[in-house]
Amino acid sequence: MSPQPYDITRVAGILAVPESAIALFDYMIDGLRRDVGSGLTTASVYDLDAMRSRRVYSDDLDAYPTGNFKRLDRNRYYARVIENAQPFSSTTIEEIADVFFDWEKIQALGFESNMNLPAVANGRVIGTVNLLNVGGHFTADKVAAALAWQPIATLCFLLLMQGDPENDSFMDPALTSRGPVMEGA
């Protein structure tokens, strides 16, 4: 078993400050970029009764604004991530097109590989960190590296849930964007 990629003392220090959800999320994103690689990163929370997700983080607000809702479809992604709390990854645009209605947008942005890392608490998925990169990127080794960050992802989403679940995000409110709108409706 490889050592954890994060410094638990640093995590404890982050948890002790105000806005710890945002600070811890930033720390995790830096680690995922270093250990896994991502050309574009978003994060989502889920409203399963309405079969939709809401974006709570984006490092490309023009392409993927926060606050927007995205329709959920019952497909391989849903079964793997939402029902079975396992990461979903693909290495080709064809695999992405099979499960995501916005695959053409993903490809137009230059990405053809994705990974969704679920945050799991009390046996259910409470959010996902969503990574995009060039074709072939999210191999089994990359998924394993991302899984090492899963406890921190879960902690981030638990912290976020302490606030306003309808509006909070992992971003400075001054940076958040236009939402909410429904994508894929």
Image: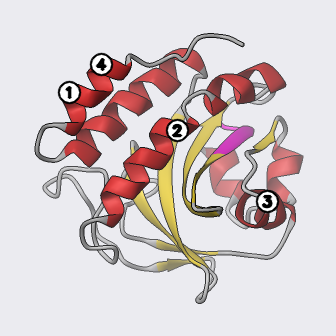
Q: Which residue is mark 4?
A: 9
Q: Which residue is mark 3?
A: 84
**Residue with the most extreme top position:** 2
Magenta-colored segment: predominant secondary structure: strand
Mark earlier in primary sequence (3, 1): 1
Picture layout, residue 140 above or below residue 24: above
Question: Is residue 62 among what the camera can see?
Answer: no
Mark earlier in primary sequence (4, 3): 4
Question: Is residue 155 among what the camera can see?
Answer: yes
Q: Residue 169, percent across and down?
A: 31, 59
- Residue 151's label in the rendered image is 2
**What residue is shown at x 67% (from left), y 38% (from top)?**
111
In the picture, the quarter occupied by the C terminus is bottom right
Q: Is residue 111 left or right of residue 26?
A: right
Question: Residue type at mark 4?
Answer: Thr
Q: Secondary structure at mark 3?
A: loop
CA separation in Å, label 4 and label 3 = 31 Å
Q: Which residue is mark 1?
A: 13
Picture layout, residue 71 above or below residue 3: below
Q: Residue 147, percent across and down?
A: 65, 32
Q: Residue 34, percent across and down?
A: 50, 16
